[in-house]
Image: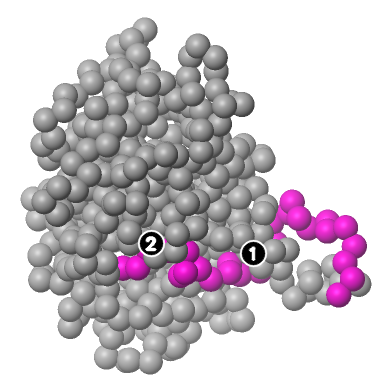
Amino acid sequence: MPRQKDPIMTEIPKGGYAGRQPQNHPVALHPPYRTSVKRSPQAAPISFPTTLSEETAPVFGHSMLGALDGDLLHNFGPQDQSAIGPRIIVHGRVQDQFGRPVAGALIEVWQANAGGRYRHKKEGYIAPLDPNFGGCGRVITGADGSYEFRTVLPGPYPWPNGPNDWRPAHIHFSIFGAGFAQRLITQMYFEGDPLIWRCPIVGTIADTSAVERLIAPLDMERTVPMDARAYRFDITLRGRRQTMFENRMEGL
Amino acid sequence: MTDRPESASQTAGPYVHIGCTPNFAGIEGVYPEDLGARMITGEVTGRRITLVGQVLDGTGTPLRDAMVEAWQADAAGRYAGQEGHDAHFTGFGRCPTSETDGSFRFETVMPGAVAWPKGGLQAPHVTLWIVARGINLGLHTRAYFADAPENDSDPVLGRIEHKVRIKTLMAQPEGDDVYRFNIHLQGPEETIFFDC
């Protein structure tokens, strides 16, 4: 069908959300990740077209953010004291599967400190806590879907699964899009980490390229000289389809 | 427009509370309040109810490291952000499961019926989303209310082939204005999960 310049590209259409893409997601049951064995549903999920319940979502305005929410180097410790470890900037763009930016998306992040230790009472790793690092932060994407935050490079750490399993360095991401159907929690890994391909949690994703899209490359262009390296992590969420009406308008 | 691959999910892990409810996790002073701690923010319209439950694994053991999110319409069936919605109701709740008995709890209102895209109404329901260590992709389900007459004509319930499983989507009344919705991840009572 001949198409004119697409006027809808930057507007969010009103059709339902395209379905999840199971080929890009982990399987529920992956025995090498032992906790999944008793926590994975066994029946097939049930599909229905998205409704208002899935197409709406809580709206979080920029006014909810504190000045340091996106600065994990400084949002926990005493004033003028920075978290310990390699300083990094993580930035990227949240878009939907049709390439439209997802503006106003709340991103919450959490991570271990530079030594691989989480600030959590159930965490027993011998590596020390950093008194200046809490390990959580949040940002909201701009009109173009872009976001940025500052933190320390998290350390890898051992975890109770197999006798000697180590998590690759990672940052957890929780993302709210414009519809609850877009809700996603994932993890970002770092380019060049040899632990990625040994990790049973990464291994829950069968598709190699889907894993590769979770690996953030070093981004020298955004690096701040003598200050912080940068990593780029783009996130793609589900998108809404055009309605029949809009399709017809577009084709005419 | 060409389809791009959706980013893969990964488990929220054992420390989801650090990122999503840091005050609950003992990390205080970063955010003034945990997100989703209150669904009712003032003189809300409608019947106040409490939705309680547990998330249980395949052995029947409650998960004490899960997080449950709730998203629902107000008493008139409008979602926050829609015109005319109740300004004293956020519609969004987030609850870490208890470290002692794995329970979750939402202080909310009975949602109104919500439009179905092809006309008609969906019965009152609360969308629930469950993440935890061992759950690789967040689980989406709905709590309907066992005593709601609208259930008989709900289009989602109507498309469930195995009718015997519909009861897994029913929050059961348990005393005055309290409903219990237990989520079974696995086993003979496995809750219906959606991939819509």
Q: Where is residue A18 in the image (x, y as percent from the top left)?
A: 58, 69
User: Which chain hosts label 2?
Assistant: A
Which residue sits at x=55%, y=44%? A234
Which mark identifies residue A205? 2
Which residue sits at x=48%, y=19%? A228
**Residue A225 colored in magenta in the image:** no
User: Looking at the picture, which amino acid does disc 1 mark?
Assistant: Asp
- In which quarter of the view is residue B187 placed? bottom left
Q: Position of residue B178 (x, y in %)?
A: 22, 64
The residue under label 1 is B3
Q: Residues within 10 Å of mark 2 (few under 14, many from 20)?
A: many
Of residues B54 and A202, the one drawn nearer to the viewer in this rendering? A202
Q: Where is residue A10 in the image (x, y as percent from the top left)?
A: 74, 51
Is residue B194 rendered to the left or right of residue A96? left
Q: Could you tell me what secondary structure mostly forms the magenta stretch? A: loop
- In which quarter of the view is residue A156 placed? top left
Give the residues in magenta: A1-28
User: Which chain hosts label 1?
Assistant: B
